[in-house]
Image: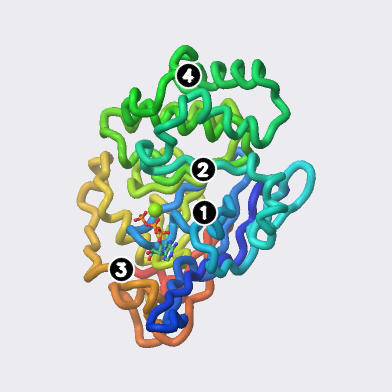
Amino acid sequence: MSKNTLVDVKNLSVHFPVHGGVFSKRVATVKAVDGISFSIDKKQIVGMVGESGCGKTTVGRAMINILKYISPEVEVGGSIEYHFDDGIVDFAKLKASEMRKYRSRVQMIFQDPYASLNPRMTVAQIISEPLQLHTKMNAKEQRDRVGWLLDKVGLQPEQARRFPHEFSGGQRQRIGIARALATNPDLIICDEPVSALDVSIQAQVINLMMDIQDEFDVSYLFIAHDLSVVEHISDKIAVMYLGDMAEYGDAQDVYHHPRHPYSKALLSAVPLPDPSRKNRKRIVLKGDVPTPLNKPSGCAFRTRCPIAQPSCAESKPEFKEHAKDHFVACPIVEKKALNL
Ligand SMILES: Nc1ncnc2c1ncn2[C@@H]1O[C@H](COP(=O)(O)OP(=O)(O)OP(=O)(O)O)[C@@H](O)[C@H]1O
Ligand code: SF4
Ligand SMILES: [Mg+2]
């Protein structure tokens, strides 16, 4: 942790109980996130990648503390310590009533711009809602702020009177960005913000988000499937596998010199523009990600890992610093630099 740390996540776990039978007894637990640690500095972009179902959205929801609204029985462990200018707060321990004061500091942009905007509200109502809830702005100040925000995201202030269905997917995502920015947050969780958009629009929206990050000095947790996007925009990359953090470190270091066998496999599938690296070996993983209802013992990746050893079944690998600020959860690659 540095003096610039905005949020320090330590040993975060998110478990969802599963009920069954006539008496609706607890029969199992979905270990969606199973003890992960990483941090995000002020004005930093951390890219988070991993296959579908590995827990990325759940991490994002935990970090804005909305899981209890989605699933009241959820069990959240560990800490999510925010270092705000006026003090340190652990979101994993805050009650809903105590959370109110901090809601405006951390915002989220969602994957589906069609589902995330209320179709019955005008753009002005959508963007001014957080202003009404979290600021003391009067109606005129709110109107001015909405117009200013629309201009910042490349829309016309006159479009404030329109409804979401009158906009394209890319424009709706711009409205979502304006809403997230309304209260000047310290962190925005961007949950695959461009994956539902046409490829031709994706770059425009990413460029806008980068300009905004620079202008507003905000930090992003940028969740994505596309590793090449994450490499370009992130300062750090976090690789998730089945609720665990496989690797976390400087973006260029993780992208060009991945250490964990899962990161190596993910990255080997990314097409490379650099011709000198075109003959890099593609690592094809066997099978699908197992269910978090029944995680393999020891290292959760061992059922698909090309270099798994019998000892990998025994205990969960420690998430250790292999090089400065570069953390990896694999004792085997720590011992010797293996050539996969
Ligand atoms: N409210 C919930 N109740 C029960 N299980 C849940 C809940 N939310 C998520 N899960 C489970 O937790 C696991 C992680 O889900 P999550 O949506 O975080 O993954 P993801 O990495 O965001 O996947 P994707 O890339 O498909 O968006 C999945 O197995 C999912 O089914
Ligand atoms: S601990 Fe074992 S199974 Fe897990 S990634 Fe390392 S070598 Fe593979
Ligand atoms: Mg998701």
Asked if the residue at tag 1 contacts the one at tag 4, i.e. Cβ–Cβ closer than 8 Å, the answer is no
Few, some or many residues within 10 Å of mark 3 (<14, 14–19, 20+): some
Asked if the residue at tag 1 contacts the one at tag 3, i.e. Cβ–Cβ closer than 8 Å, the answer is no
Q: Amino acid at mark 3?
A: Val
Marks 3 and 4, Cα distance to the nearest angstrom?
44 Å
Residue 76: image quadrant is: bottom right
Marks 3 and 2, Cα distance to the nearest angstrom?
26 Å
> Horizontal placement of 134 versus 26: left or right?
right
- Which residue is the site of mark 1? 61
Quadrant hosting ligand 1: bottom left
> Horizontal placement of 220 versus 137: left or right?
left
Residue 219: image quadrant is: top right
Question: Which of the two residues, 9 or 144, is positioned nearer the viewer here?
Answer: 144
Q: Amino acid at mark 1?
A: Arg
Marks 4 and 1, Cα distance to the nearest angstrom?
28 Å
The residue located at (71%, 49%) in the rendering is 83
User: The C terminus appears in which quarter of the rendering?
Assistant: bottom left
SS type, badge 3: loop
Nearer mark to the viewer, of 4 and 1: 4
Asked if the residue at tag 1 contacts the one at tag 2, i.e. Cβ–Cβ closer than 8 Å, the answer is yes
The answer to whether one can see residue 160 in this image is yes
- Which residue is the site of mark 4? 160
Q: Amino acid at mark 4?
A: Ala
Nearer mark to the viewer, of 3 and 4: 4
Question: Mark 3 or 4 closer to N-term?
Answer: 4
SS type, badge 4: helix
Few, some or many residues within 10 Å of mark 2 (<14, 14–19, 20+): many
Q: Is mark 1 within 8 Å of ligand 1?
A: yes
- Which residue is the site of mark 3? 289
